[in-house]
Image (cartoon, helix red, strand yellow):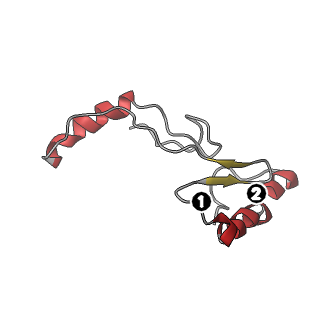
């Protein structure tokens, strides 16, 4: 499922760090009764790290808009003010990011 996400691993060690064997344990645990109290979380799992994403934060805002034809410039302005999304490594502004127009 994740084979084509990001640059291809170049070494055997990099391939091993992306092995499903690192993802399977957290998926198995999440499917168990022991994880009954865990909901609404995103986990990152690899041979490098097991981590929990720390949620969503409200960024730039606007007054509500009823007319969808008026949204283009408003969303464009909010996007210009918003910080970049976190990338696959959880850090702001790293790969993958939307392409600039």
Q: Quick one: SS at disc 2?
A: loop
The N terminus - image quarter = bottom right
Q: Is residue 74 found left or right of 19 in the rendered image?
A: left
Q: Where residue 40 sits in the image (x, y, percent)?
A: 52, 57
Left or right: 4 as drawn, with respect to 101: right
SS of the residue at dot 1?
loop
Name which residue lies at 52% across and 45% down: 55
Per the image, the residue denoted by label 2 is 18
Q: Nearer the viewer, mark 2 or mark 1?
A: 1
Camera-nearest residue between 37 and 26: 37
Name the residue carrying label 1: 38
Q: Residue at x 36, y 34 (%)?
A: 79
Residue 22 drawn at (x, y percent): 78, 60
- Quarter of the image holding residue 94? top right
| Figure quadrant of the C terminus | top left
Image spot of residue 3 (x, y percent)? 67, 62
Furthest-top residue in view? Answer: 81
For disc 1, the neighbor class at 10 Å (few under 14, some 14 to 19, many from 20) is few
Judge whether 86 appears above or below 22 on screen: above
Q: Is residue 23 above or below residue 9?
A: below
**Count of all numbered marks drawn on residues in the image:** 2
Q: Earlier in the sequence, mark 2 or mark 1?
A: 2
Gap in Å between the C-alphas at discs 2 and 1? Answer: 24 Å
How far across and how far down the image is residue 99, in percent? 46, 41
């Amino acid at each position: 499922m994740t084979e084509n996400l990001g640059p291809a691993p170049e070494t055997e060690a990099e391939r091993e760090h992306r092995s499903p064997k690192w993802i399977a344990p957290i998926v198995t645990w999440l499917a168990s009764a022991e994880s009954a109290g865990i909901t609404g979380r995103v986990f990152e799992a690899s041979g490098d790290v097991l981590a929990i994403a720390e949620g969503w934060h409200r960024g730039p805002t606007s007054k509500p808009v009823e007319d969808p034809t008026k949204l283009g410039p408003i969303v464009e302005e909010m996007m210009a003010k918003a910080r970049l999304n976190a990338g696959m490594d959880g850090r702001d502004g790293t790969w993958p990011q939307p392409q600039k127009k």
